[in-house]
Amino acid sequence: MSSHGAPIPMTSTPCGPLHGTAVVPGDKSISHRALILGALSIGETRIRGLLEGQDVLDTAKAMRAFGAEVIDHGGGNWSVHGVGVGGFAEPGTVIDCGNSGTGVRLIMGAMATSPITATFTGDASLNGRPMARVTDPLALFGTQSYGRSGGRLPMTIIGAADPVPVRYEVPVPSAQVKSAVLLAGLGAPGQTVVIEQEATRDHTERMLAGFGAQISVEDTAAGRVITLTGQPELTAQEIDVPRDPSSAAFPVCAALIVPGSDVLVPGIGLNPTRAGLFTTLRDMGADLTYENERLEGGEPVADLRARYSPDMKGIEVPPARAASMIDEYPVLSVVAAFARGQTVMRGVKELRVKESDRIDAMATGLRANGIAVDEGPDWWIVTGLGHGKVPGGATCASHLDHRIAMSFLILGMAANAPVAVDDGGPIATSFPIFEPLMGGLGAQLQRLEVAPV
Ligand code: S3P
């Protein structure tokens, strides 16, 4: 099933060279945060280039339910009239975050230190994902949560009426957990301290500073120590959302594996906590260059140019790089199939608790398409066959996971036979223009008609 409606089976047929400019949508992580911090600030926050994918639209709807005025002005221009820190109203409806782990976890944090109650739910994928990683630290503030067994949604959160600040060491490398604790810390008096062993995406820290919060980040022997002073008055901002590196990954990887391709992907956010895939591809021998490197809205940005790269080799991806490319392992595993030798990916246990178990979903589909994959609890190895040698020909399950669906469609562009997915519907959660964008470059994507039942 797709996340919002009937399944949309799709096929990707091997295609000729991909050419042109791929203008991908705004960054999903930054879009969620812009809406949430806009809602927690005083005044009108204007956002340009917001990702209008379903995940972010669900967060916009949630912010309205908590009392903010969120207006869509068209063309990716949005405004948010916030209610200020501590100003959230109690929602009159259940908050449905759809497919979005980022949406639900960040919003739980943002409401956790207000004296209100909210009930959260999502689609079948989100309702199967672990929430204790967020509700455990929120309990330290005095927040109560009542969910299904295993800490799953649907779940009711009772915000702390009299919150205390916390000091919390994040036990898993997760920007969602870190961000939930920081957003909850906004509502508590005094200093909330979050410590992470591995640096994860830092958009929340950067944006909190931009909205006027007192926040410091220190790299110490004990890890990255983030200190936030609670109960600030956040001031509305103008936000230009950079284009999403996690979406750019798809046209970039397609260009590297489809013979004769040359694709420009302009204006991509290259925050070092997000750009691990591009470094890895270059380590594998990809012809991938950064042009026109610049700073936009405090984030490093460049135009990416990707050309067909027939001589890529498998490598051991440094585990220390995992957090900076965690969403890109599925499409990396597709590129790895076209490289020579083994691509070894270790330290990636978190892949098992994303929108799907991404190691299992990719390994199963890659094997069905003739590629050998070995796997363990926190590692997997793809044995590349080299260009022109990847059989393809199978239908893969996308498991309500946008990145799994897109990765297999990229595989079909360069395999020897078409590759299908059972449901391309989830692609709309993060990359609603994926089909026309890839089609405009020369990809052959088809939706298959499903007979009505
Ligand atoms: C995100 C953090 C990551 C990532 C997700 C977006 C964020 O999740 O996989 O797509 O915006 O904070 P984790 O925090 O679970 O690693």
Image (cartoon, helix red, strand yellow):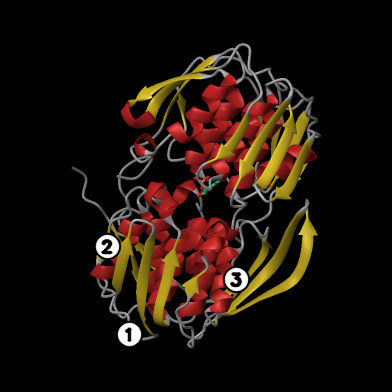
Residue 283 on image: x %, y %: 56, 78
Q: Which residue is mark 3?
A: 279
Residue 342 on image: x %, y %: 39, 78
Apparent side of residue 85 relative to residue 436 in the rendered image (left or right): right
Taking the spot 64% from the left edge, 46% from the top edge, the residue there is: 30
Distance in Å between CA atoms under marks 3 and 2? 26 Å
Residue 211 on image: x %, y %: 78, 35
When asked about the image quadrant of residue 408, the answer is bottom left
Q: Which residue is mark 2?
A: 364
Against 316, residue 191 (above or below) is above
- Whether residue 353 is visible here, answered yes or no, is yes
User: Does mark 2 have its CB less than 8 Å from ligand 1?
Assistant: no
Label 2 crowding class (10 Å Cα cut-off): few <14, some 14-19, many 20+?
some
Q: Secondary structure at mark 3?
A: helix
Closer to the camera: disc 2 or disc 1? 2
Q: Nearer the viewer, residue 451 or 137?
A: 137
Report the amino acid beneath label 2. Answer: Thr
Q: Secondary structure at mark 2?
A: helix
User: Does mark 3 have its CB less than 8 Å from ligand 1?
Assistant: no
Q: Nearer the viewer, residue 314 or 219?
A: 219
